[in-house]
Image: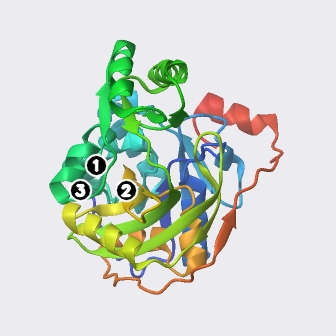
Amino acid sequence: MYVSPDLNKSKTLTIAVTGLNANDNPGPGLAVIRALRTGFGENIRIIGLAYETLEPAIYLADQVDKTYRIPYPTAGTEALKARLEQIQQVEQINVLIPNFDAELYNFIKLEKDLLAVGIHTFLPSHQQLEQRDKVNLSAFGKKHHFKVPADETVFAASEIDGTAGKFGFPLMVKGKFYEAHHVLNITEAYKAFYKLQAKWGLPVIVQQFIKGTEINIAGLGDGKGNAISIIPMRKLYITEKGKAWAGITIADERLIALAKAFTKATAWKGGFELEIMSNDKGELYIMEVNPRFPAWVYLTVAAGQNQPMALVNLALGKAVTELTGYKAGKMFIRYAWDNIVDVEEFQKLSAFGEL
């Protein structure tokens, strides 16, 4: 039987992190790792958990101490459980932070099994995960009196004509896990549907377009209805995939109030991101709710609230008080660079599943 160590006396925390990709649709993993290293200094060891051998953060030796490949979410919980137990025998992981939407169901299902072998998590429940899902967002908004764009869940391309006639153009066409396309006509709508169906499967969500200013909010809930941290950011530069490539923290009490209302309504446990559109009347629409930290979460550290560090402390059962002050006007500007590695490292990960 696993016996939990005295983590307060433990010299080094071992933290496992997923989401190590860093392309034009980056995962949050590297930003989470940077936040943890800033917060805990030399007192942590980072274990990367990767699905692909070319996830860039794998090869950043100053950020990730060791990486293991894990099975894709489609392999199911038993395959994931077996692999994590195998890794745990070697690494003695204290906390695990998943960072992809598609993997959360399996990790939540294994929460008690992971704790039994000493791996702490701090995740929403399946019910919380389901109610904020894109296909349920409209009903969620009506139930809790949040402004949410009208949408339709589409299972066949033939349904698009009727939905487009109902909402008019432009429209947003969204994948069930990731990606959103701004379409101006029926041809673009069909193209987006087939692309998202091929990549993420069905259903595809067709959503009413709301014109305005795009704002994202990174938050952390304690699972009891309280918001531990809330940092709003306005997008300054957006990629073709709709991802923020630059942004700036802003001070707006309405955004703080909205995030607190969401946390209270859901009793959200863990990190989250609200994607908000502020229209020309100043009305705030919730466009999406992402059930994990965003890829820009390191900006919360720069603004004065280290959300990943606070999550780790919550996972370990430590008392964490609400973080209230933050600095508006802090910017992030993402960049890409070429990291040079030896092919032997790639071959080791491919052949042995660890590096």
First in residue order: circle 3 vs circle 2: 3
Within 10 Å of the Cα at label 1, are there few (<14), some (14-19), or many (20+) other Cα atoms? some
CA distance separating discs 3 and 2: 49 Å
Name the front one of labels 3 and 2.
2
Mark 3 lies on residue:
1
Query: Residue 164: x and y, percent?
Result: 39, 26
Disc on res. 17: none
Disc on res. 132: 1
Tell me what residue is drawn at x 42 percent, y 50 percent: 89
Three-letter amino acid code of the residue under disc 3: Met
Query: Residue 277: x and y, percent?
Result: 45, 56
Name the front one of labels 3 and 1.
1
Query: Residue 196: x and y, percent?
Result: 48, 25
Mark 2 lies on residue:
285
Tell me what residue is drawn at x 54 percent, y 53 percent: 28
From the viewer's side, name the closer residue of 319 and 31: 31
First in residue order: circle 3 vs circle 1: 3
Left or right: where does residue 14 sit relative to residue 113? right
